Image: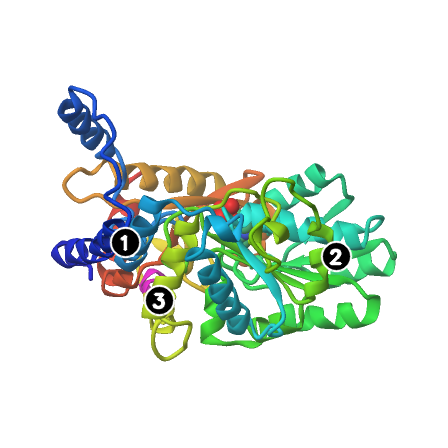
Amino acid sequence: MADPTSRRALIERVLSGVETWEASWGALPDTHLPDGLDGLLDEYAARMEANLPFFHPRYAGQMLKAPHPIAVAGYLAAMIVNPNNHALDASQATSPMEMEVMRMLAGMFGLPDEALGHLTSSGTIANLEALWVARELRPDAAIVYSEGAHYPHGRMCQVLGVASKAVPAHPDGRIDLDAVEAACQRGDVGTVVLTPGTTGLGAVDDVHEALALRERYGVRLHVDAAYGGFFALLGGPAYEAIAACDSVVVDPHKHGLQPYGCGAVLFADPSVARFYLHDSPYTYFTSDDLHLGEISLECSRAGAAAGALWLTLQALPLRRESGLGPILAACRRAALDFAARVDASDGVTLHLDPTLDIVAYFPDRPTTHAIDRATDAVLHAGMADEADPIFLSTLRVSADDFAALHPGISRDADSVRVLRSVLMKPVHEHAAGWLAERIETLASSVE
Ligand SMILES: *Cc1c(COP(=O)(O)O)cnc(C)c1O
């Protein structure tokens, strides 16, 4: 499918389906195309060249990759019609698809069949909805999250006007559950946010151990699996424990091969639908069946996002041994291989063994300040080499966390940037050796 001819064939095939539909209504109008469009399209194409090649193994930086061609085809076919998954009559085809994919996602996490959920435009909005429901259920209690968690949790709590508390994370990025328990003992905690797959290091919080806090203190457990959620397909105790949590967020536009505009939130207890309850004088008129807009904070939502995800998950089901599972397993192998090569290399040190497919490492230097400078230099030298570029990212680590993992390095700064590679493409499995060598060369050539 990586072959552009087959991608094109796929798109033509899916668009022919739209033509069949058009045939019964008359063709979609070609509305007034202005003069000079050719030049404008050339300009647009030229401006697109400024993009970095997210799809290419040379891009080993942030959480970015091209969507799967099946998702592109599915999205395009639905987008041309432009259904809106707010109301059933606005999305006769794609609302039922959204309900089906939500059941598949609930199944992946082992949540009850009746779990309530919907797609959102992003993981941020999905988390906002989960924290909002948490606040409605526990209005006077705080939401606790880890310092290692995605930064918007604090901001979302501010938006919601709910008390929040950040607790420390271990140097490897996992939430410190003793610190969470200490906060619970003070009695003002309503909800704990757990992250199986942190954005920075891909650390997996011990969700299975946090279940005891739910028993002991009656706190709600919200799981932010925006990044790491699909790794549930590969198993492991933290992922298996999600089945016993209260809410979970996952981003199909990260590891679910979708274009942006596709997050998801699920609630184990469907009765939280009561918080969403509203009446709309102009919307829900066609049926008494559930309209997705009745259980979502967002109103208009792209039916195309649901269509694309549905088509993708039919072609690549949520299974461990076939479909999406082997794709995630390849990313994991890429990270392990790359980490082993970095570890064995001269001049580069592995910051931490990767838990998922995110690897952090740094150029060998005697002090944290020198490491920080060399990290920055490798990042820029990699991008600047026009003949043989590589694109990495950096992560800022506190001096305390860094010293805990690398006690031999002298500390002369409050924080230190290390290099970070999100190896979220299966092609990285075949590029790990080459990538590690390239980084080794750069690390020895910069100051
Ligand atoms: C990416 C991410 C988010 C935010 O999701 P968006 O889709 O970018 O809004 C939240 N939590 C974690 C752990 C993430 O990795």
- Secondary structure under tag 1 reads helix
Q: Is residue 340 magenta?
A: yes
Mark carried by residue 291:
none
Residue 173 vs residue 357: left or right? right
Query: What amino acid does circle 1 point to?
Result: Trp
> Of discs 3 and 2, which sits in the foreground?
2
Instruction: Name the quadrant containing residue 30.
Output: top left
The span picked out in magenta is: 338-344
Reading the image, the residue beneath label 3 is 340
Residue 402 vs residue 207: left or right? left
Could you tell me residue 392's position as x and y percent?
A: 34, 46
Reading the image, the residue beneath label 1 is 21
State the residue at coordinates (87%, 56%). Answer: 186
Residue 336 shows in the view: no
Query: What amino acid does circle 2 point to?
Result: Thr
Measure the C-alpha gap from mark 3 to mark 1: 53 Å
Reading the image, the residue beneath label 2 is 191
